[in-house]
Image: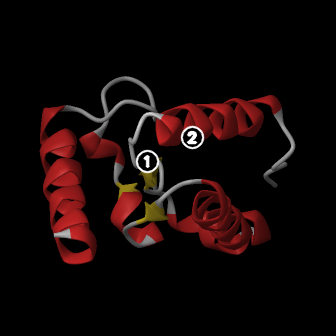
Amino acid sequence: GLDKSCQGFTRLKKFFHQANSKGVKVVGAYPNLCYWVDYENYPSFHETPKKIKSFFEEHAFGFVGKFKDSHFTNDYFFDTENHLNHEGVKIRTDNLIINLKSHYF
């Protein structure tokens, strides 16, 4: 699960406040995920995205994208499941631009 009281979320809230005080609007999106079909069997796979979106909607300016937009197969990552390769970055960036344009421009 995802604990919204963890240190990471506390730091994000502070960042959102600082950004907002300077006129910067922070928009959230789901983090990249190296997707495996077996994840579908775990309740946290379905609950965590709701918590992420809820957190950003409550504390940031907004949120864009669908959880599925963040799913990538192993082919789109470097040697870890955290860092997209060049092709993955291009797809992710293109999707993010489309989502931002449809919500804010």
The C terminus, quarter of image: bottom left
The residue positioned 23% from the left and 51% from the top of the image is 92
Report crowding for label 1: few under 14, some 14 to 19, many 20 or more residues within 10 A (C-alpha): some
Hey, what amino acid is under mark 2?
Answer: Phe
Mark linked to residue 48: none
The percent coordinates of residue 31 (x first, y second) are 47, 48
The percent coordinates of residue 96 (x first, y second) are 24, 57
Q: Give the residue pinned by disc 2.
A: 16
In this rendering, position of residue 24 left or right of residue 76: right
Above or below, 81 relative to 45: above
Above or below, 28 relative to 90: below
The percent coordinates of residue 43 (x first, y second) are 77, 71
Q: Are marks 2 and 1 in contact (CB under 8 Å)?
A: yes
Q: Which of the pair 9/59 is nearer the observer?
A: 59
The N terminus, quarter of image: bottom right
The percent coordinates of residue 48 (x first, y second) are 69, 62
| Residue lying farthest to the top in this orientation | 79
The residue positioned 55% from the left and 54% from the top of the image is 60
Q: Give the residue pinned by disc 1.
A: 26
How is colour applied across the structure in the image?
secondary structure
The residue positioned 66% from the left and 63% from the top of the image is 58
Hey, what amino acid is under mark 1?
Answer: Val
- Dot 2 lies on which element? helix
For residue 78, what is the image quadrant? top left
C-alpha gap between disc 2 and disc 1: 7 Å
For residue 66, what is the image quadrant? bottom left
Q: Which of the pair 27/20 is nearer the observer?
A: 20
Report crowding for label 2: few under 14, some 14 to 19, many 20 or more residues within 10 A (C-alpha): some
Question: Quick one: label 2 or label 1, which is nearer the N terminus?
Answer: 2
Above or below, 93 relative to 14: below
In this rendering, position of residue 94 left or right of residue 79: left
In this rendering, position of residue 99 left or right of residue 71: left
